[in-house]
Amino acid sequence: MLTVLKNHVGLEQFFSEFLEASGKKPDEMSFYEKAKACEGLRPPEVELAIWKVVYAANELRNKIAHTFEQTKIKAKMDALRAAYLAALTPTQAEAAKSWTTRGSPQVQWNSAVRIWSSRPRLCARASRDGQRLPSSRTVILKRRS
C-alpha cells in the first residue's frame, strides 16, 4: 500500500510540473483534475491506455485512503492490474503472466515509471513550445534527455 501512495504522490508532482511547464496553474487542483488537464494537453509520449492506468491507480489510492475493507481494495487492485496489462506490449504481457497478487503493487510502480520516464521529453516539449519551465529540477531533467 505504501508503494501505491508514494507513487501517487510522485505522479501528482509530475502532473503539477508538466501543467506549470504548459502554462497552467495546478495549485488548487485535485489529482484527478491534474490528470484530466494533462490528458487534455495530449502529450504524444503518453498513450491512451496509460491514462486508464492513471485513473485506475487513483481509484486504488482513494480506496486505500478511505477504507479498511480488503475486498474493496482488492477490487480496485484488480481493476488497476487489468488496465495495466491492457497497456502492455505483447512481449511485456507475456512476462507479466508470472506476476502474483502479492506482487501487485509492482503493477502500479511500473505504470508510474513508464509515465515518469516520459517526463523530461514532456517538459522539454512544453519548453520548446515557448512555455516557462517551472523549476530547476525540471531544467536539469530536460538537459539529460
Image: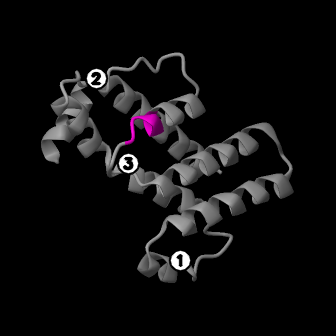
Vertically, is 106 above or below 37? below
Residue receiving disc 2: 134
- Left or right position of 20 against 66: left
> How much space separates mark 2 and mark 1, taking CA atoms?
36 Å
- Left or right position of 80 against 125: right
> How much space separates mark 3 and mark 2, taking CA atoms?
16 Å
Q: Amino acid at mark 3?
A: Trp
User: What are the residue bounds of the magenta stretch?
Assistant: 38-42
**Residue in the image at 40% along x and 51% along y:** 115
Residue receiving disc 1: 96
Magenta stretch mostly in which secondary structure?
A: helix
Q: Amino acid at mark 1?
A: Ala
Indicate the secondary structure of the residue bearing disc 2. loop
Vertically, is 145 above or below 104? above
**Residue in the image at 56% along x and 67% along y:** 86
Magenta span includes 24: no
Magenta span includes 39: yes
Viewer-closest of 44 and 33: 44
- Left or right position of 19 against 54: left
Question: Could you classify mark 1 by the number of other residues whose Cα lies within 10 Å: few (under 14), some (14-19), or many (20 or more)?
Answer: some
Vertically, is 6 above or below 21? below
**Residue in the image at 28% along x and 23% along y:** 134
**Reading the chain from its start, which is encountered first: label 3 or label 2?**
3
Viewer-closest of 84 and 144: 84
> How much space separates mark 3 and mark 1, taking CA atoms?
20 Å
Return the x and y of residue 74 as percentages of the image width and height: 77, 59
Residue receiving disc 3: 116
Indicate the secondary structure of the residue bearing disc 1. helix
Return the x and y of residue 42 as percentages of the image width and height: 39, 41
